[in-house]
Image (tube, rainbow, N blue to C red):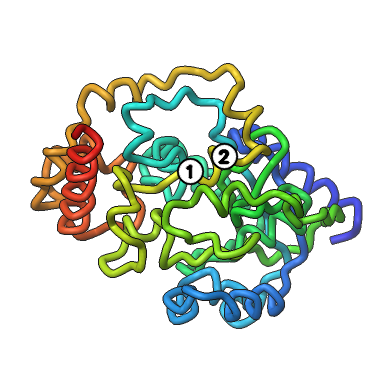
Amino acid sequence: MDDEARKALTRRIKMKGLELGFSHVGVIPCHDFPDYAAEVRERDGYERFIDNPASFYAGCFPSEFFPQGKSIVCATFGFGDVDYPPELLKYIGRIYLARCYVPVPDNMAGKRLEAMGEFLESQGMEVYRGNIELPARPICAEAGLVTYGNNNFAYTEEDGSFVVLYTWLVDAELAYDQAPVENEGPPDCNLCLKACPTGAIESPRHLNPMKCILLNCLIPNGQADPKAMGTYIHGCDICQEVCPRNHDVLRRAKRKDSFLEELVANFDLERVAELDSLDDDYYRDVLRPVMYNYIRDPAVFRRNAERALAAEHIFEE
């Protein structure tokens, strides 16, 4: 494929991604990420990811599991434009209420991801379909789509840190973005470090996931003090809400999400505390759309809900 053909194919890919509803689309050459892998190894609390053969740490070495890879297509999807009901925000993080992070395969975000993969295949490319997760943040940063914040989140200009990142590994050479960006957070800002109730952000851009409320909602044996986790049962937005880079996004006029308004009417923390099966109608109809990510044990749902109910009782006293 000559340069003009690569440029034309890349243009088609980007246009298709934008047509499907992604906020931005970029392309970088496929390569390993040894520097990022080394950084992960040096961080506290990342052992569970290093030991997981399907995690983003394993994804730092695509040459080992997809040696025919030539390019990585990446995209962002912003979810900062929604009016998230406060009745839900005290329990669930925005990224989960947006239903776009590790989405249910049959919802719109899941279908959008699959449609992009199918389009790439329709253009004659082989797309990696395995279960190893690529390191989306350094990929999107290399493509110029995101910068980093001191809270360890990726940021875009339009949506702040309220953005989710996606990647597709393909076997075709494409036209690459050459837009490296400065990825250091504001050097004199530590609001997120001060605001984190569990002390998970140990220094700028160094988050200990084992102390993070988000991860402690998903695993049975984290290191966060349960009393410091408040009423959160799935995710946490505290370090994003205090970030000055998100202030304009949070102040901006928002669109209503009818699904979330219906969810407010049906969400019952006591019902979550009684969940005994993922075959339960309540899980399928109410919880699954926003809590599909990772939790596969009803006992974890019950534990989170019981902790939140106890916290609410304390707040009411």
Q: Are marks 2 and 1 in contact (CB under 8 Å)?
A: yes
Tag 1 residue: 238
In this rendering, position of residue 162 left or right of residue 264: right
Type of amino acid under label 2: Val
- Residue sitting at the far front: 317
Residue plotted at (41% across, 41% down): 93
- The answer to whether 266 appears left or right of 206 in the picture is left
Q: Could you classify mark 1 by the number of other residues whose Cα lies within 10 Å: few (under 14), some (14-19), or many (20 or more)?
A: some
What residue did someone put label 2 on? 242
| Residue 226 appears in view | yes
x and y percent of residue 160 in the render? 64, 38
Instruction: Provide residue 177's location: percent of width, then percent of height.
Output: 83, 53
Q: Quadrant of the C terminus?
A: top left
Q: Amino acid at mark 1?
A: Ile
Residue 123 visible in the snapshot? no
Determine which quarter of the picture holds residue 128.
bottom right
User: For mark 2, does the 10 Å Cα neighbourhood hold few (<14), some (14 to 19), or many (20 or more) residues?
Assistant: some
Q: Name the one closer to the observer, 233 or 176.
A: 233
The quadrant of the image that shows the N terminus is bottom right
Marks 2/1: CA–CA distance: 6 Å
